[in-house]
């Protein structure tokens, strides 16, 4: 089954790889096997998913690649990552950003999923002839986070878990937010995008309000946030997307100007 999935993933994106040498990027197409076994799925894939959803203007192709890769990684769907790493690079993601995405999501989706994705990424980078300099994140000073917001967030962490799991609270404050979120190899908006995508993919609805608000503080618009969930419905399934919609509604309402 794993061999079939890996082969299917390769065939799925074969049309993209063959036709992406010029400026025009043809839409990826499933293999003839998919058309023969599930003709309606083939039609939905070519005409709806890649023919319409990926072309919608509410999110840039780069954003769509970010959230798709994040969702696949979060759900451990490594067989699909080869095609989407290549597509992401074609859509403007830097190798260093893909590397940073994998590292970031180790904290939100678990080390095993991230380690599996790292192996796939390494092969993609090698096949594309990318150098270590292109993959390594740029060296720069860490971001400065808003002191008032950080004080409030730290207090919330301590209040919720500090007395029960003090070391988890320390790692959350000192490593996750104090170090990882301050690195500059991804923008704060990118980190928020992939975090929201990963949480949605895993059905972690309880964690979404904080991170969706953070995403909008980091520049994600209401229209874009709604489009993230719409896009992800195709990659994580309708039930998880539908479960995220009430969170969108609640967050949008809470951010409306009072008056």
Image: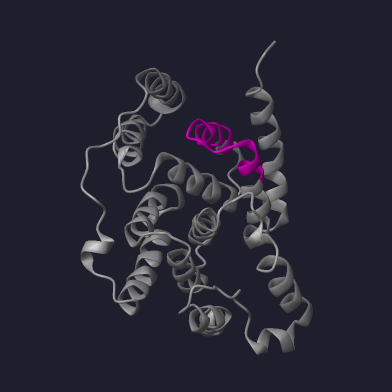
At horizontal 66% and vertical 89% (from top left) the residue drawn is 32
What percent of the width, then of the height, locates residue 67? 53, 54
What is the magenta range?
208-226
Work out whether 254 lies above or below 118: above
The part of the image, by quadrant, that contains residue 31 is bottom right
Q: Nearer the viewer, residue 15 or 106?
A: 15
* Number of marks in picture: 0
Q: Position of 10 compared to 243: left or right?
A: left
For this orientation, the residue located farthest to the top is 259
Residue 92 at least partly seen: yes
Q: Is residue 210 magenta?
A: yes
Can the viewer see residue 163? no
Q: Nearer the viewer, residue 88 or 248?
A: 88
Q: Quadrant of residue 35?
A: bottom right
Which residue of the protein is positioned furthest toward the right in this rendering? Answer: 40
211 vs 128: above or below = above
- In this rendering, would 173 be left or right of 89? left
Taking the image as shown, residue 219 lies to the left or right of residue 46, namely left
Residue 114, percent across and down? 39, 59
Q: Is 235 above or below relative to 198?
A: below
Give the quarter of the figure containing the N terminus: bottom right
Give the prevailing secondary structure in the magenta stretch.
helix
Is residue 150 found left or right of 213 in the rendered image? left
């Amino acid at each position: 089954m794993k061999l079939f999935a890996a082969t299917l993933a390769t065939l799925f994106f074969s049309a993209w790889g063959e036709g992406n040498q010029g400026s025009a990027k043809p839409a990826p197409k499933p293999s003839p096997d998919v058309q023969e076994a599930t003709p309606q799925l083939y039609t939905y894939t070519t005409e709806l998913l890649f023919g319409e959803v990926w072309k919608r203007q509410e999110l840039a192709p780069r954003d769509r690649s970010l959230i798709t890769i994040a969702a696949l990684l979060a759900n451990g769907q490594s067989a699909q990552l080869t095609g989407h790493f290549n597509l992401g690079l074609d859509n403007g993601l830097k190798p260093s950003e893909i590397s940073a995405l994998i590292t970031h999501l180790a904290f939100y989706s678990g080390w095993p999923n991230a380690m599996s994705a790292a192996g796939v990424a390494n092969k993609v980078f090698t096949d594309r002839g990318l150098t270590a300099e292109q993959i390594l994140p740029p060296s720069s000073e860490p971001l400065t986070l808003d002191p008032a917001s950080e004080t409030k967030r730290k207090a919330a962490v301590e209040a919720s878990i500090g007395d029960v799991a003090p070391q988890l609270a320390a790692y959350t404050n000192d490593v996750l937010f104090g170090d990882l979120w301050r690195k500059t190899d991804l923008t704060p908006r990118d980190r928020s995008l992939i975090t929201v995508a990963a949480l949605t993919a895993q059905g972690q609805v309880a964690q979404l309000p904080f991170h969706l608000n953070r995403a909008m503080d980091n520049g994600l618009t209401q229209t874009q946030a709604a489009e993230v969930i719409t896009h992800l419905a195709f990659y994580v399934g309708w039930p998880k997307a539908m479960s995220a919609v009430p969170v969108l509604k609640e967050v949008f309402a809470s951010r409306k100007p009072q008056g």
